[in-house]
Image (cartoon, rainbow, N blue to C red):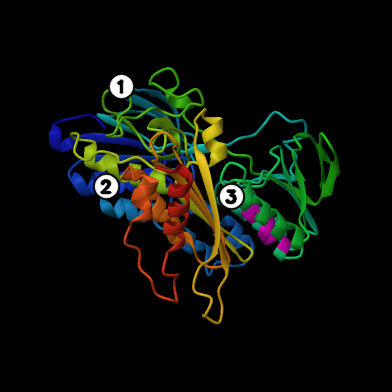
Amino acid sequence: MSTVNEKNTAVAVIGCTHAGTFAAQSILQEHPDWRVHVFERNATLSFLSCGIALWVGDHVSDPKKMFYSSPEALAAAGATMHMRTDVTAVDAAGKTLHARDLETGEEKDYAFDKLVVTTGSKPVIPPIPGIDSEHVLLCKNWDHALAIKERAKDAKSVVVVGSGYIGAELAEQFSLAGVKTTLVDAMDRVLANNFDEPITAQVERAFADHSVELALGQKVTAFEDTGDGVTVVTEKGRYDADFAVLAVGFLPATELLKGQVDMLPNGAIVVDEYMRASVPDVYAAGDSATVFYNPTSKHDYIPLATNAVRQGLLVGRNIDKPTRKYMGTQATSAVQLYDLSLAASGLTQGGAERRGLDVRLTELTDDYRPEFMLTTTPVTSLLAWDPATREVKGGQFLAKADISGAANVISMAIQAHFTIDDLANVDFLFQPNFDKPVYYVGAVAMKAAAEAGE
């Protein structure tokens, strides 16, 4: 991979899930004559891990469709693929890397002109006694998905540790399949990092209605292997199960660049608005990198596939010269649990407090469409806003109707620096099949403006 001339620029892409896949595609699209080498330690790429719980619950038509690209597709686009190859060392300033073929054991040095770090994230694995038991599974990649799917076939009971999106979805699907399910979390609410109490209380009722035992406010202290299962020991109780799934979060997998580029304390590589790291010709994207979080106007770590895709695309646009700025993120997301649809964008009140920020929270519950319709259902709307500037900082929604589009509305409002007054006066549609004369997003903004006063 030595450089001969500008047309022969050599790029090393390390890691190929979402950010790596889109970075490689975008680089080749922008620079078809460059030599792009992709290094991936797994045999697959582009796995949509957000579909694991749906697959466990038999809601996936074909698990192969959970991959939207392949080594063959990237090779056809012009990339040189190094699958099942582990990069063991990187010299960012010297522009070399060392890699080992996991199939043959062959080790080799490669030179590059530009480096793209898309190594992604790794599951948080706390130093808890017994956590290495074969009955304690992780939930991150394709191999994990296969293991969970296989164990779920005959399981009578499971303990899910962690009640974020992944843990909550797994607990839902296990309970619907008739598996005795316990959901454990050190936080005192489910989805506590994603939603505020008026919404999480309704989710907890739904779990209880489906016989999920909630062990909240309980830190796990040990996993005891029972031979044919595991006992999860917490500060307050013991929970027996055929197996447990650990889903307590992710950390950037950036050890290769430690001490070579600027990072957050958790290891996320700090990138600028063009995806550039602090060392020339080094770029990072996705779960290995920071995002610019618009609600706070600061760098943050928010591992979401949506962020990874957008950042990966920007690598290709900016890898030759700064061209397209990153617009930042609001961390817009959604989840379906039982018959409840939840969606959010930006800061929750809890998230603001954890960051030392002051936001007000306005709550509104109203039917999503007119009462003269044969059916309607309530929507819980929460709007977070800055009491000093009146700017919209976040929104959360829950209903038994599809309210996912509301989170996208809030996302654009935050990005455009809308005030609650601006949001209250947006021209939203009215049609009885879809909403009321005052759309619930506008209605909660009106209530917030009234609470704020002139």
Which comes sooner in the sequence, label 1 or label 2? 2
What segment is highlighted magenta in the picture? 168-175
Disc 3 is placed on an element classified as: helix
Calculate the distance from the C-alpha at mark 3 to the C-alpha at mark 2.
29 Å
Mark 3 and mark 2 in contact? Answer it, CB < 8 Å.
Answer: no
Closer to us: 106 or 368: 368
Disc 1 is placed on an element classified as: loop
**Which secondary structure is most common in the magenta stretch?**
helix
Q: Amino acid at mark 1?
A: Val
In this orientation, does residue 80 appear? no
Query: Would you place residue 97 above or below residue 438 in this image?
Result: above
Q: Amino acid at mark 3?
A: Tyr
Is residue 172 a member of the stretch shown in magenta?
A: yes
Residue in the image at 70% along x and 28% along y: 127
Residue found at the far bottom of this picture: 374
In this orientation, does residue 453 appear? yes
Q: Amino acid at mark 2?
A: Ser
Q: Which residue is mark 3?
A: 165
Calculate the distance from the C-alpha at mark 1 to the C-alpha at mark 2.
21 Å
User: Would residue 311 appear left or right of 193 to someone viewing this image?
Assistant: left
Residue in the image at 31% along x and 30% along y: 272
Which comes sooner in the sequence, label 3 or label 2? 2
How crowded pointer 1 is (Cα within 10 Å; few <14, some 14-19, many 20+) is rated as few
Q: Which residue is mark 1?
A: 279
Image quadrant where one finds the C terminus: top left
Disc 2 is placed on an element classified as: helix
Q: Which residue is mark 2?
A: 26
Closer to us: 49 or 69: 49
